[in-house]
């Protein structure tokens, strides 16, 4: 007899909560679809191929890990799909084919499965894998093609080595790396950048849909963006710099899709506030002062590392409790 | 170290079961810093082995002379002497290597492996055994550094000991393993693998032990019932 049948449940109106891990993961993937569509439109079929490779690699390596470690297969929860999509969308459009494959392996094997699988990973697999790839192949990860350049099937001819950084008219700087772009193209995504991060419009459609469906916490993206805006004001002292900063780079996709990962965001209200404000601030800080043009993934990784501390020290007072009445075993009583 | 150990035990402890890098987790600073290539690993390891061997020898020989209260300063003087010798010899005869290892040669003075062995082994054991301990601990350290350095060199540069076929035609070089980040990553992963293997071994040994016990109990029971019937 299965274990669950031993608990008899009867009488009383019970509210069955809809949704499962699989359903949530599929809905998040669906929310990423507009961004994927825009990326394919702007950067050609090879961009779609890169995302596909990332998803396939994530699936394969999760499956392989479970096979080797003789554990039950966990790919049925479709979390590999979200990680793969996020990873693929965070890569430059014409990266060599091995980059998404290696990224998927790192995200799944090292960041997720070695720490115990879904829900036990300390950091967002896609963001961490992106950092790993950036440190591994920095030139391939910072060579961006311009939208609508090189033909719709152009990327396939350079899939072994990636495009030559000196290729005129195809490779160009992103808005963060010194390229010129007006607000409308930044909003629509008609600029150089990673496959899924350029179109703020597509990301907003997906993100707002997730908020309406109550899958992600609205506070996190809002606070990340607000804190980034204030930080830009502090560092640049220029109101006209705020909107371009919010619309460019990985800020949107990070705020809506990566910072909101359940396993790696805090459980308490004040923890969430500190976490989100920290990520927004650190992103702008890295953009302004570090060697790299973009700092979203670094900020998210740092925020993820902060989460266990926030969860430990910001335990809300139970209703009716007097004074600092902390539960003895912290971690057992979380919101 | 209450019990006297045999030479074989000392060798096994230094190389495997008490490997300074992966089991005692000592000397992680030079481990992470100099293992960008296998050659760096070997030279750092051998330099440390030299210092460890002679400092263990002298400290063990002087263990009844050194007053307990000032033993740490005495150890430092002894260790620093040998580190200075290594440093000078290396600077004279291997200037390239001296440049690439840089400050980490002088930092052998404060390498915790040497202190730990002086404090926990050499100060309580006879001279010959202490020399053996220094040698095998040093070789264990060298082996770990070569392992880490080799992995990092192959992945980041496509070579092994700076020579051999250039592997970079076969796979893209992964720059990250040449950085400190890669050092932490490799160290953590290799350590996890070693812990996993060690864990499996102890579990297997325990299972074997439990089985043997069970068989013994069954045997005894069978003997008892047999006696009853008889």
Image: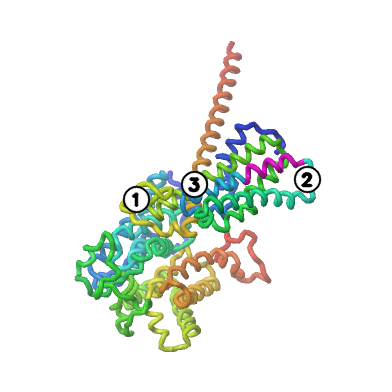
Q: Is residue A195 above or below residue A288?
A: above
What's drawn in magenta, residue-wise? B51-63
Q: Main secondary structure of the magenta part?
A: helix
The label on residue B167 is 1
- Residue B146 is tagged as 3
Q: Name the residue: 65% across, 70% down.
A: A321
The answer to whether tags 2 and 1 share a subunit is: yes
Res. B32 visible in picture: no
Mark drawn on residue A281: none
Quarter holding the N terminus of chain B is: top right
Closest to the observer: A130 or A74? A130
Where disc 2 sits, the SS reads loop
Q: In which quarter of the image is residue A326?
A: bottom right
Left or right, B9 with respect to A29, comes to right
Position in image of residue B47 (x %, y %): 57, 47
B136 and A278: which one is in front? B136
Question: Is B46 displayed left or right of A293 in the figure?
Answer: right
Question: Which of the two discs, 2 and 1, labels the residue nearer the N terminus?
Answer: 2
Q: Residues within 10 Å of mark 3 (few under 14, many from 20)?
A: many
Please state the horizontal and vertical placement of residue A186, each as a whole percent of the image: 33, 80
Q: Is residue A109 left or right of residue B7?
A: left
As rendered, which of A157 and B66 lies closer to the eye? Answer: B66
Magenta highlight on residue B29: no
């Amino acid at each position: 007899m299965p274990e669950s049948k031993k608990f008899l449940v009867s009488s009383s109106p019970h509210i069955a909560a809809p949704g499962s891990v699989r359903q949530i993961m599929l809905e998040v993937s669906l929310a990423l679809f507009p961004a994927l569509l825009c990326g394919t439109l702007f950067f050609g079929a090879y961009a779609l191929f890169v995302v596909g490779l990332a998803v396939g690699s994530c699936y394969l390596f999760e499956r392989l890990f479970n096979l080797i470690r003789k554990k039950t297969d966990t790919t049925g929860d479709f979390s590999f799909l979200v990680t793969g999509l996020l990873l693929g969308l965070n890569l430059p459009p014409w990266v060599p084919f091995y980059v998404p494959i290696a990224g998927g392996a790192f995200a799944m094997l090292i960041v997720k499965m070695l720490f115990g699988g879904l829900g036990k990973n300390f950091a967002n697999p896609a963001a961490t894998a992106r950092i790993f790839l950036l440190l591994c192949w920095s030139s391939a990860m910072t060579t961006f093609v311009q939208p609508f350049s090189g033909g719709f099937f152009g990327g396939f001819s350079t899939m072994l080595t990636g495009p030559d950084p000196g290729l005129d008219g195809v490779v160009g700087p992103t808005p963060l790396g010194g390229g010129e772009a007006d607000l409308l193209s930044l909003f629509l995504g008609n600029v150089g950048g990673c496959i899924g991060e350029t179109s703020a419009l597509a990301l907003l459609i997906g993100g707002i849909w997730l908020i309406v469906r109550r899958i992600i916490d609205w506070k996190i993206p809002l606070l990340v963006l607000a804190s980034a805006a204030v930080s830009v004001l502090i560092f640049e002292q220029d109101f006209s710099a705020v909107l371009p900063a919010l619309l460019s780079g990985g800020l949107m996709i990070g705020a809506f899709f990566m910072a909101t990962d359940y396993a790696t965001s805090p459980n308490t209200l004040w923890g969430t506030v500190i976490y989100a404000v920290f990520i927004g601030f650190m992103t702008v800080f890295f953009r302004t002062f570090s060697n790299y043009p973009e700092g979203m993934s670094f900020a998210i990784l740092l925020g993820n590392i902060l989460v266990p501390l926030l969860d430990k020290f910001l335990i809300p007072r139970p209703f009716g409790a007097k004074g600092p009445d902390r539960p003895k075993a912290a971690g057992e009583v979380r919101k | 170290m209450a019990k006297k150990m045999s030479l074989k035990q000392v060798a096994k402890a230094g190389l495997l079961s008490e490997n300074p890098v992966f089991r005692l987790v000592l000397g992680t600073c030079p481990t992470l810093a100099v293992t960008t290539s296998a050659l760096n690993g070997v030279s750092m390891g051998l330099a440390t082995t030299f210092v460890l061997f002679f400092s263990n020898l002298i400290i063990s020989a002087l263990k009844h002379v050194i007053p307990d209260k000032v033993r740490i300063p005495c150890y430092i003087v002894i260790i620093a002497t040998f580190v200075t010798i290594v440093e000078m010899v290396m600077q004279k005869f291997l200037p390239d290597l001296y440049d690439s290892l840089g400050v980490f040669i002088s930092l052998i003075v404060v390498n915790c492996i040497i202190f730990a062995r002086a404090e926990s082994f050499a100060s309580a054991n006879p001279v010959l055994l202490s020399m053996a301990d220094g040698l095998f601990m040093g070789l264990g350290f060298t082996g770990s550094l070569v392992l880490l350095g080799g992995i990092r060199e192959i992945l980041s540069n496509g070579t092994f000991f700076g020579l051999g076929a250039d592997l970079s035609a076969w796979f893209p070089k992964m720059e990250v393993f040449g950085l400190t980040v890669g050092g932490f990553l490799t160290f953590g992963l290799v350590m996890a693998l070693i812990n996993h293997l060690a864990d499996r071994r102890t579990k297997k040994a325990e299972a074997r032990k439990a089985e043997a016990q069970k068989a013994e109990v069954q045997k005894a029971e069978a003997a008892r019932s047999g006696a009853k019937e008889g």
